Amino acid sequence: MIVGRDIHVKGQIDDCRALVVEGRVEATLKTDRLEVRKGGTFVGSAEVEHADIAGTFEGTLNATGQLNVAAGGLVRGETRYAKITIEAGGAIVGTVARAGETEDRSERPSLANTGLADTGS
């Protein structure tokens, strides 16, 4: 299914093998493949095998296979992935974990102590 530019879709999408977003989708999604193209926006939750993000994804993304974030792509929220590629200029903001990992902050160093903390700039 392709959601073209200037199209806005809201709801739940279950029976779709692939979703291409050029416009705006606000939904709960379960599909094999999600592609958010440059200028496109997906808001909600998605459980997918493969995701290519060149536009904006906001919400909860669970990529059980490959997650690709292109230059200019933005993933914001809670992200889980099995494999990941982020091109220069792509970004992930929020909680990020490999699929199947549980978060145990007691064993991870604080970013504040590593010089890697987000300064807001």
Image: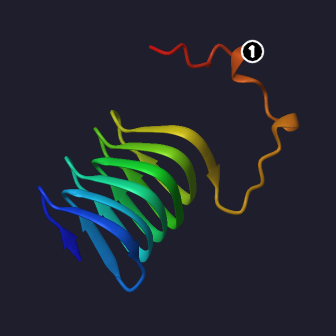
Which percent across, then down, holds residue 95? 61, 42
Q: Which residue is mark 1?
A: 113
Quarter residue 110 falls in:
top right
Which percent across, then down, holds residue 81? 56, 58
The amino acid at mark 1 is Asn
Which percent across, then down, holds residue 42? 34, 55
Q: Which residue shows up at 40% across the image and 62% down it? A: 51
Q: Which residue shows up at 45% across the image and 57% down it? A: 44
41, above or below 73, in the image: below
* Residue most extreme to the right: 106
How many marks can you see? 1
* Residue most extreme to the bottom: 15
Quarter residue 67 falls in:
bottom left
For numbered disc 1, what is the local secondary structure? Answer: helix
Is disc 1 surrounded by few (<14), some (14 to 19) or many (20+) residues within 10 Å? few
Colouring: rainbow
In-image side of 35 versus 39 (left or right): right
Q: Which residue shows up at 35% across the image and 82% down it? A: 17
112, above or below 44, in the image: above
Q: Which residue shows up at 43% across the image and 48% down it? A: 58
